[in-house]
Amino acid sequence: MDDITGTIVRLIKETDLTHRDDLLLEARRAFLDYLASLYRAVGRQKVKAVAHWAQGFAGKGLMVGQKGTSYPIFAAFYNGFASHYLDLDDAQSNIAGHFSTVLFSVLLSVMAPRQSVKDFLTAYVVGAELEGLLGSLVNPEHKWQGWHSTGTLGPLGGACALAKWAQLDESKTAQLLSLCGSQSGGLGMQAGSDGKPLHSGFAARNAVFAFDLVTAVGLSARKTPFNSQTGWLKTFSAPTGSAEFFESNWLNKGQILDPGLWMKTHPYCSAAIGGEAACKKLWQQGIRLDDLQKIVFHFPPGADKALRYEAPLTGMEGKFSMEYVAYQVLTQGCVEDRFFDLEKVPESFTKALPRMQRSRDLPRVPKSVRRIVVTVQTRSGKVITAEESAPPGSPNRPFTEEDLFEKLALSKDENWAGKVMEQTRNWPKGTMESLWPLLSVESGEEV
């Protein structure tokens, strides 16, 4: 086992969050946001189709929001796909992607109701920590090269979470990471199609599949997935880091706290949240799209990579367009989720596009910082600039308990949301048993 891999597997094994309530409470918040993001999607045709398919594989794996269960590999796949389907789930800047959708999906597919909440949340924190540290080494180049980090880093985070949850020894943990690293994949060009949420499903499935191969089948793999000559980081053309890097940064604050999680009110790419907030400031000043002759979105170099559609054709592509989000705010004062379901974007948006442009002229910022400045010029020639450094849902302005309740309630109903909040209020104490019935659909209940 190489030094880097050896350090990582030891850190996984030794992590104890007994005195880290800050991390456990943030993990609870992430879980509530995960449930809200998944439940909002359970009635969608594609999600129901995947659920029906997965239920054809017999097993006890929990399928969140569904009546049946499935073999854990396919339950994890469904959970990952469903929780990322709308792109309403949280994101993190170091990985430039989403880890809650994969990590919770993996753990829920293999857990039993009577297992410890603390073990569940600890496994999540550990998986997120590895993903975040690896992301800090590979990004932003990894993103710029065209990879979707949810698919490339997700299997490794899932392996890390499973190793912690199952208390695997260091040898099996190294092999599990090795097999999951061999299954890293996901092209960013899938954004705006079903391919993007499939990456989350694939990542969750791959982690549980590799876990079965190592623990149940007894297959082996190289125990050097992070060696500096041929390992995962080297293969992805990233700095290989060092054992000292992981040793000194592991849970030093913690990746879910610093740089922290971005949580969403609406189902579009989190890279546009600051831009939406800036446009709302303009709206509040009386600025309307019809009054403008020019709109410029200013970014640091490369910071708009995830917002890949400057002229989206469909609502789904519009999830990854600063222009489409701004159009909604500057015409009606807010974002409306229905616009992201349109098969064709409104003609009024297409006509407004010539007045919109991007400029990558802001100074470079740390990868943990997201900055968008919106400048508009009115038809009378007046120039107005707006920026919001702490938009709602950002690490600088995190969701409150009330925000999380509202997101849960919008995803199903207030009665269910209240029960979920109540059953998790004393976390990390207790087991998952009292919450478990709320995670599936009883016979006769509508999905």
Image (spheres, helix red, strand yellow):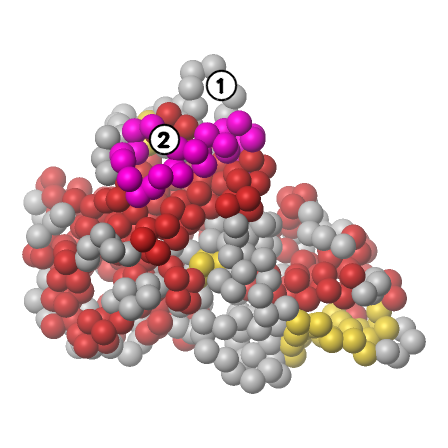
Asked whether residue 179 is in view, the answer is no
Marks 2 and 1 sit apart, C-alpha to C-alpha, by: 17 Å
Between disc 2 and disc 1, whose residue precedes? Answer: 2
Three-letter code, disc 2: Leu
Give left or right: position of 407 versus 163. Answer: right
> Which of labels 2 and 1 is toward the front?
2
The quarter in which the N terminus is drawn is bottom left
- In the rendering, at what x and y percent does residue 358 appear? 66, 74
Above or below residue 38? Residue 249 is below
Specify few, some or many for label 1: CA neighbours under 10 Å numbering under 14, 14-19, or 20 or more: few
- Determine if the magenta segment contains residue 431: yes
**Residue pictured at 50% horizontal, 32% vertical:** 418
Give left or right: position of 114 versus 102. Answer: left
Look at mark 1 in the image and give the residue it sits on: 445
- In the rendering, at what x and y percent does residue 89 appear? 48, 50
Where are the magenta residues, as a range?
411-434
**Residue pictured at 52% horizontal, 83% vertical:** 364
Residue 420, quarter of the rendered image? top left
Above or below residue 140? Residue 99 is above
Look at mark 2 in the image and give the residue it sits on: 435
Specify few, some or many for label 2: CA neighbours under 10 Å numbering under 14, 14-19, or 20 or more: some
- In the rendering, at what x and y percent does residue 113 appear? 27, 30
**Residue pictured at 16% horizontal, 44% vertical:** 166
Q: Secondary structure at mark 2?
A: loop
